Image: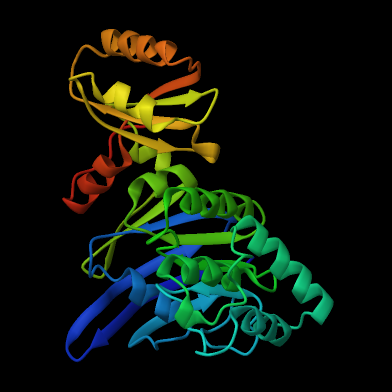
Amino acid sequence: MAALIETKELIKRFRGVTALNGIDISIDADGPVGLVGKNGAGKTTLFSVLCGAMRASSGTVRVLGEKPGSPRLPGRLGVLMQEAAYRRGVGVDVQLLHLARLQGLTAEAARAQIRALLEQLDAAAFVAQPPERLSYGQRKRLGIAQALLGDPRVVLLDEPTAGLDPVAADAVRTLMRREAERRLVVVSSHNLYEIGDVCRRVLIIDRGKLVADEDIARLKASSNSLVLTLDREASPAVVDSLMELPEITEVAVTGQGRTAITVHFATAHVDRLQVEILSKLTARGVSVTGLTRERALADGVLARLSGEPAGPAS
């Protein structure tokens, strides 16, 4: 079976600047894949080449066995670039319906699919507005709906939660997990908590080169953080109470329903810290249903960008 996405010696140059420098990628399985790198690393350029918005300077690129821009890709490849483009003065609902019909859906099927996506993204209240009346975050949510229209086999999402409030971002992450169960979803994001929460595999790009292609679990091999699964949503008061402990440097809320927290710490006395964390949570009426120790994904990514090897899997 051909890879869903494959590039060989992919190079893209802009007026003497090499944005992509010999990228070799092969993705042949469904699921969520993360794409990370510093600003200017080449992530958006790679997405642009994969979807046919830009031509490669040299090398081979195939998506679903086709060259980018092939007439056989519409409806099979969904794309959200950093911001979806809509026509001014026309309700986005009308535009989404038109785009869905172009992908071969009947009017009835298109309306049903649009309703379902808008409900999951909590976007039905403003979809009838023209794009110029919408906030950045509202346009972003509608752009995600657009990328999923027509039930595409492969979906590319560039910074899907940038500019969203925490509730909307959590809804988008929930949707990404659900969609990744039956299609390939590739997510480019600067939010490494999000990549670690949603994705199982990560591609790391630096200065136009692929420096790592690894399982998320491998990059979290050593132990400088605790991941706790709670029996309820982690409220701001719970986070604030944990930050009262001097050994804790950061608390991030993740997971479906915001019921997981990642606690980063700076201490060698981890067992004592665990007891103190559990005591704080108990005082707030919160129970812990799961606890693991792992390395922060950010540390693993930074190690790869600096050329350090990943630690052994635990």
Residue 132: quadrant of the picture: bottom left
| Residue under the image location 80 percent in, 81 percent down | 107
Location of the N terminus (image quadrant): bottom right
Horizontal side of 118 relative to 240 (left or right) equals right
Name above or below for residue 55 compared with residue 246.
below
Name above or below for residue 249 compared with residue 8.
above
The x, y position of residue 52, in whole percent, is 47, 85
**Nearer to me, 105 or 60:** 105
Q: Is residue 310 among what the camera can see?
A: yes
Q: Is residue 2 among what the camera can see?
A: no
Horizontal side of 17 relative to 178 (left or right) equals left
Q: Which color scheme is applied?
A: rainbow
| Residue under the image location 31 percent in, 80 percent down | 11
| Residue under the image location 35 percent in, 14 percent down | 280
| Residue under the image location 33 percent in, 13 percent down | 274
Name above or below for residue 236 compared with residue 88.
above
The x, y position of residue 229, in whole percent, is 49, 25
Horizontal side of 200 relative to 16 (left or right) equals right
Name above or below for residue 305 compared with residue 289.
below
Location of the C terminus (image quadrant): top left
The x, y position of residue 303, in whole percent, is 21, 45
Residue 45: quadrant of the picture: bottom left
